[in-house]
Image (cartoon, rainbow, N blue to C red):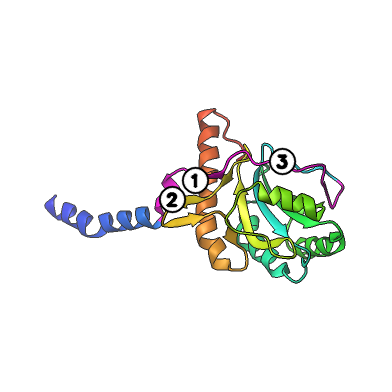
Amino acid sequence: MKKNIVLFVLFVLPIVAYLFFASGVNSFTKLPTITPKIADFGNWKSLKGEKVTLNNKITILGFSGSEILKNRGNFFNLNEKIYQRYNGFKDLQFVVICPLGTENDAQKIVESLGAFTDVSGWHFVFASPDDIKTFYDQLHLKGKLDQNLGTSNVYIVDKERNLRGRKDKDEYREGYDTFHPSDLSNEMLDDFKIILYEYRAALKKNHNATKQL
């Protein structure tokens, strides 16, 4: 009996402890709100001519800027690291805000992604430069759009239109850099899992654990 206890302490307990800490502390907390109740989109249309809304959707939000094709690698990074893992959930959408006049370039991105991905969860919506600036300003972020009205960062917005991130004084994070795959695979994936955990827990509490988030 004592031998079994010793073996457990020496071999099993360290493995359990490792798995616990390796899963990340963040996975057991609630992701803070950076900006509450951001505005919904205006009467902006997508490539399909549809109106897209932030209401009742978990949204990964991006700003393409006018040089969409030049920065297309960012979309492929996001698609590979996040989208392809979770695009089966019907309450999740990836929305990219683009300047009017870039519709053809955005269509090329969608077609390229569509060669190996179900792109039904991707939405490119179009607005005037002034509308994009106004929308971005009300997010109250520390980061700024570049001169082309774009950023390589994407943001997590929950179903209640709260922009979520990290507010620790030692680790403030309002967005996730799609230029760096490691940023998506580590920080963003970790934070995104927290959001999923929150909604899955709510669904289970309401006895409605379906394919929805």
The amino acid pointed to by label 1 is Leu
Residue tagged 3: 40
Ranked by sequence position, the earlier of labels 3 and 2 is 2
Query: Residue drawn 78% across and 57% down?
Result: 98
Above or below 198: residue 16: below
Indicate the position of residue 25 as horizontal and vertical percent values: 39, 51
Name the quarter where the C terminus is drawn: top right
Query: Percent position (x, y) of residue 12?
Result: 27, 56
Looking at the image, do the residues carrying marks 2 and 1 touch, with CB atoms under 8 Å apart?
yes
Residue displayed at 81% across by 61% down: 106
Instruction: Name which of mark 2 and mark 1 comes first in the sequence.
Output: 2
3D distance between C-alphas at marks 2 and 1: 8 Å
Name the residue tied to disc 1.
31
Percent of width and height locating residue 92: 66, 45
Task: Please name which of the two marks, 3 or 1, marks the residue nearer to the observer.
Answer: 3
User: What's the CA distance linking mark 3 and mark 2?
Assistant: 28 Å
Q: Which residue is mark 2?
A: 26
Q: Give the magenta part as a residue range.
A: 23-49
The kind of secondary structure the magenta stretch mainly shows is: loop
